[in-house]
Amino acid sequence: MFESLIEGANEAVVRLQFGARARIEFYETLSLLLENHVLLHDALKEMVVIASEENKKPNNPRAIVIHDCLMLISEGQPLSKALAKWTNDQEASLIAAGEKSGRMKKAFEDAIKVITAKRSILSAALGATVYPAVLFALACGLLHMVANQLVPKLAKVTDPKSWEGAAKLLYRMAQFVTGYGVVALICLLVLALLVFATLPYLRGRVRVVLDQSPPWSVYRTLQGSTFLLNVAVMLQSGVRLEEALQLLAVNAKPWLKERIDAALYGIRIGGNLGVALHRAGHHFPDKKAVQYLSVLANHDGFEAAMSGFGDRWLAHSIKKIQTFSKVTLACGVLAIGALMVVVIAGAGGIQNAVEAGM
């Protein structure tokens, strides 16, 4: 039992290290070799030698993954099944669809497309969260300095009760930070953690209302664009719509699973994807997106149209999140600026009071 736990932990570490960049390189290299008529078994064999630096580093994560795939393929297993342990279900499904249709190059391209898109989405999401966090930390640092260094020194020179205007506001701020600052900070951090914890888990009608406002609306935009891209890529690879949704629901968090399950139900009772999403009433991925999907699904060539729509919606979503990030950054900078003005004006007012008293 202990050995199996160690083995499982080692596999988890290797899978973590076999990240987006490593998987993209794996798919690109394998695609190039297969395109040049190298057999799959031989291609993997050559890739193991390269990844392990001619067997000098056999414990390299990429070498471990490729060697494991080579062993399973030697036993007659398909590549999709060999990769299932090291990638997510969606990538494995794309490879399986490529094996079924004989279009492996297209399958690898689709897998790379999904990985690249997810990285773009993650980058946009980080931009929307990191900047506000940094500005909040700067504001906290400035308030701490004002409350514990600036105001106490100035209070020794002149009585705070005589301060007026900006100086009085500065004193009140310092009093609040000194008396309740730690409690307020803890409450804000707990509230932020609770809000972020609700993003993947909170469901129901309350969540539908919350999804109209940040940060829930940002989360809906991120998940919606990923969902559309995933469905589009799998449909293009020959995966049936219902099967694609089932695959996406396997590892989906409760919030997303609720929406996918509702779409599946709508499709099973005879609706197309757009109609099913509309009937669910979740406004997922977006009201406008649902309207477009309803129109596209009623015409021939839905798979090709879905692919183009998925790409455009992804670009639109990333731009939307980047705009939100810029607005948040601008508001944060203005807030920091306003705080600085209060500090400078307050200090100036106190200095004037001291000079007047002399």
Image: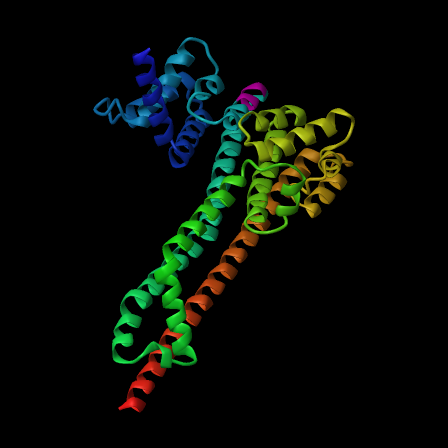
Colour pattern: rainbow
Q: Quadrant of residue 52?
A: top left
Drawn side of residue 147 relative to residue 113, left or right:
left
* Residue 278 picture location, percent across and down: 74, 39
Between residue 214 and residue 88, name the one nearer to us: 214
* Residue 38 picture location, percent across and down: 41, 21
* Residue 13 picture location, percent across and down: 33, 27
Task: State whether residue 355 is above or below residue 98.
Answer: below
> Most extreme residue toward the top, as rendered?
75
Which contiguous range is marked in magenta?
96-100
Q: Quadrant of residue 357?
A: bottom left
> Most extreme residue toward the left, as rendered?
56
Task: State whether residue 46 is above or below residue 197.
Answer: above
Q: Which residue does the image show at 41% across and 67% down from the upper left? A: 336
Q: Which residue does the image show at 47% across and 48% down from the upper left? A: 192
Main secondary structure found in the magenta portion: helix
Is residue 138 visible in the rendered structure shown here? no
* Total marks placed: 0
